[in-house]
Image: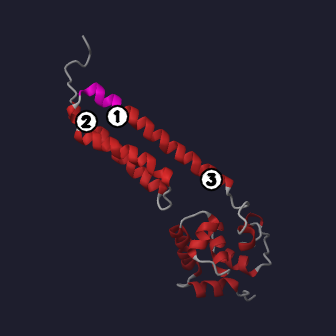
Amino acid sequence: MRAFAFVKIQSPVVCWLFLLFELTLMGYQLFRCYPTFQRKDWVPLLVLLLLVVWNCTLGSMTDLHRLVIVNLSVLLLAVGLMYLTFLNKGDEHSSRGLSDSPDFPEALELPDVANIPEEPTDPFLDNCRKCLLTVREIEVVSLLAKGKTYKEIAELLHISTSTVDSHAQNSYKKAGVNNKTALLHKFLTVPEK
């Protein structure tokens, strides 16, 4: 006699639990790939969407064993595809790193920020240090000073345009200004001694 023979698990309940998990995975994939969707990012979403449609139409009518086998096998396939797209994105980022980008060295001519001497000689870096900007904020402000747009900065730094905007807004707050012109004027002028 089985230990839990008195508990009857019904297919519709399991079907709804699988649906909840599948929709969560779809949301994760959408969130992870936003805003730069590529064709390979849609493949796991389509597989999960087909599974959701199957669960909504036929899932609750099938026996429990078939329901679990179909859902688990398709979920493993979808998670495997998601993992492969994740690995491919990592390879793309490492293969087109900042040092390999032909535009990057010309676009950003900052010294190594980690090794700034105690007495900086560059007024730009001195002003950035006074305002406590992060390394990424310094990069964004430097590219703004070179006349780059948010979209161009995002492509050079391999980040989204909303992240560029966030770094710019943080720089505005830290510098105590509210527009790009005032920010650049503050950082590019020689500080008074």
- Residue sticking out furthest to the top: 1
Where is residue 163 shown, x and y percent of the image? 53, 67
Say which amino acid is labelled 1: Asn
Quadrant showing the N terminus: top left
Residue at 26% from the left image edge and 27% from the top image edge: 64
Nearer the observer, 70 or 117: 70
Residue at 78% from the left image edge and 71% from the top image edge: 118
Where is residue 192 shown, x and y percent of the image? 73, 89
The residues bearing labels 1 and 2 have C-alpha atoms spaced at a distance of 9 Å
Nearer the observer, 121 or 85: 85
Q: Which mark is residue 71?
A: 1
Where is residue 85 shown, x and y percent of the image? 53, 47
CA neighbours of label 1 inside 10 A, class few (<14), some (14 to 19), many (20+):
many
| Tag 2 residue | 59
Say which amino acid is labelled 3: Glu
- Magenta span: predominant SS is helix
The residues bearing labels 3 and 2 have C-alpha atoms spaced at a distance of 38 Å
Q: Is residue 147 magenta?
A: no
Part of the protein shown in magenta: 63-71
| Tag 3 residue | 92
Across the whole image, how many numbered discs are drawn on residues?
3
- Mark 3 secondary-structure assignment: helix
From what the image shows, is residue 32 above or below residue 111? Answer: above
From what the image shows, is residue 72 above or below residue 137? Answer: above
Q: In the image, 186: left or right of 4?
A: right
